[in-house]
Amino acid sequence: MRKIVAALIGVSILISLIPGCATTGSSTEFGNRVGNKASDFTLKDLDGNTLTLSALLGQPVMINFWSTT
């Protein structure tokens, strides 16, 4: 009986590890998930200069989206 219970526990552990082994097939993903790269966008700063997110690659960027009504 103990061997059966131990075998069932072992199989359950192995089955629970399978989803963690899956890969997505792409090393760079874009989108709104932690760890993904942000999608590139272009905007104008307060002085009217055009700025793209990709131009800031490798630098810390803090984006604050706000609006007034």
Image (cartoon, rainbow, N blue to C red):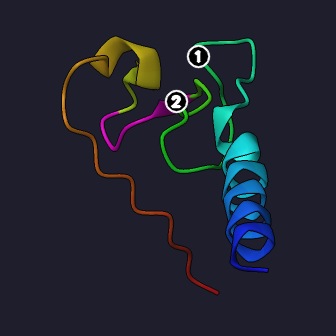
Comparing marks 1 and 2, which lies closer to the viewer? 1
Vertical relation: 63 (above or below) 22: below
Vertical relation: 7 (above or below) 60: below
Cα separation between marks 1 and 2? 7 Å
Inspect the image, locate mark 1, and give the three-letter code of the amino acid beneath it: Thr
Q: Give SS at disc 2.
A: loop
The one of 21 and 62 positioned closer to us in this rendering: 21
Q: Residue at x 74, y 42 (%)?
A: 18
Residue 67 occupies quadrant: bottom right
Badge 2: residue crowd in 10 Å (few <14, some 14–19, many ≥20): few
First in residue order: circle 1 vs circle 2: 1
Please provide the residue range marked out in magenta. 42-47
The single residue placed furthest to the bottom in the displayed view is 69
Residue 69 occupies quadrant: bottom right
Q: Are marks 1 and 2 in contact (CB under 8 Å)?
A: yes
Residue on which the image places disc 1 = 28
